[in-house]
Image (tube, rainbow, N blue to C red):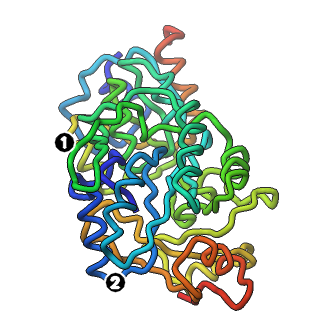
Amino acid sequence: MHTCLSPCGDLMMSPRKIAAEAGKKQIDILAICDHNSAENVPAVMRAARTEEVTVLPGMEICTREEIHVLAIFDHDSHASAMQSIVYDRLPGKNNADVFGLQVVANEDDEVVGIQERLLAGAVDLSVDEIVSDIHALGGLAIASHIDREHSSVISQLGFIPATLRFDALELSVHISGEEARDRFAPYAGYAFVRNSDAHFLDDVGKNTCEYLLARPTFSELVKALRGTDGRMVCEG
Amino acid sequence: MTLRETAERLHLSVRCCDDGLDRVVTGAYTGDLMSDVIANARAGNVWITMQVHLNIVAVAVIKELAGIIIVQGRQPAADTLKRATDEHVPIAVSELPAFEVAGRLYADLFSGA
C-alpha cells in the first residue's frame, strides 16, 4: 500500500493511522510501497510495533518503459539502498497542485518534510535493470497490477519476456481469479498475488491475499511465492 | 491554426471543453509515455496519443498543452473526461491511427496547405 508520501496517496495515509487500520482489520503482513521512494517506511515500521502486523519495506518503482514494479525487501537498509539507485536516476520536480503533495511523516504522524522529487515520474532505468537491482539487494520484484491497461508490464510491453524474472505477478481488484487464469494462461508458472494497493485508509484490507506461512516474515513470503517447503499462495 | 480548425480539418470528435477550442496550436507532440511527454512536449502543442487514462490530463496541465487528440477511436475514461473538464483541457478523438493524424496535422500546420 501507499502512504501520504505517494503523490496520489491520501494525506490520511500516515504511519500511525496505517498501522492502526491494519491492526483493526487483522492484517498479518503488509508492504509499504510508495512511488519511487521508501522514506516513510521506517515510520510505519515503528508505528506498527504496538500492533500485531509485520511491515515490510518496499517501493513501487516506475521503470523507463513506465512499467510499475513492486520491490519488497527484508530490511529497511535494502529498501534505502534501492531508493538511492532510484533517486539517482529520477529526473524532475513535483508539482503538488497537479500531482499531489508528497509528505514525509514520522511515527507520530507529524510532518517532517515534503519530498520535492517527481515521484510520479519514470526512473531512467529499464525494467530489466530494475528487477536485477532488486534481486541484487535480496528483494522481491513483483509486476504490479498486470491486468491494468497502463503502467503494467503487459500494457507496456505486450507480454512478459521470459528473461524478466519476476517473483510474482500482481492482480488488481478489477479482475477475478477465474478471468485472470484464462487471460494470463501463458504465465501460469508464475505466482499470482493480490494487494490492496491502498491509497486511502478505507481501502486497506481490500483485495487481500492469503498465504500459508509458518510466520509472517519476509523469508516465509519468499518461500510461499516459490511454493517451497509447503508454503504457498492460497488460491484466490 | 486554432484547435477548433484542427478538429474540423481532421474530423475529430470533441469530447469535452468546447470552450477551449479557440486556443492556437503551436505544434504537436506524439507520445504514449508520460515521462517522454513531460520531458519533451512544448506549451501550446496538441498531444497525439493512444493513452486514455486519467494521468494524461495532469501531463497536459503541467505542460500547458493546447489539448489532447486520442487516436484509433479509443475512448477517454470517464474519470479522464471529468478531470479534463475541471482542468479545461480539450480532448478530442480521431478514428485514425497516430501516424496519419500526425501526418495530416503536420501538413496543415507547416506545409502551407
Rounded to the nearest angstrom, the CA distance separating label 1 from label 2 is 39 Å
Q: Which residue corresponds to the image point at 54% horizontal and 61% vertical from the top-left?
A: A144
Q: Which residue is mark 1?
A: B86
- x and y percentages locating residue A77 in the rendered image: 55, 50
Tell me the crowding category of disc 1: few under 14, some 14 to 19, or many 20 or more residues within 10 angstroms, Cα based. Answer: few
- x and y percentages locating residue A102 in the rendered image: 31, 41
Residue A150 is at least partly visible in this image: no
- The amino acid sitting under disc 1 is Asp
Q: Which residue corresponds to the image point at 36% horizontal and 48% vertical from the top-left?
A: A6
Q: Which residue is mark 2?
A: A26
Does residue A93 sit above or below A151 in this rendering? above
Labelled disc at residue A201: none
Does residue B10 sit above or below A50 in this rendering? above
Circle 1 — which element?
Answer: helix
Q: Which residue corresponds to the image point at 58% horizontal and 89% vertical from the top-left?
A: A212
Q: Chain of mark 2?
A: A
Q: Residue furthest right?
A: A163
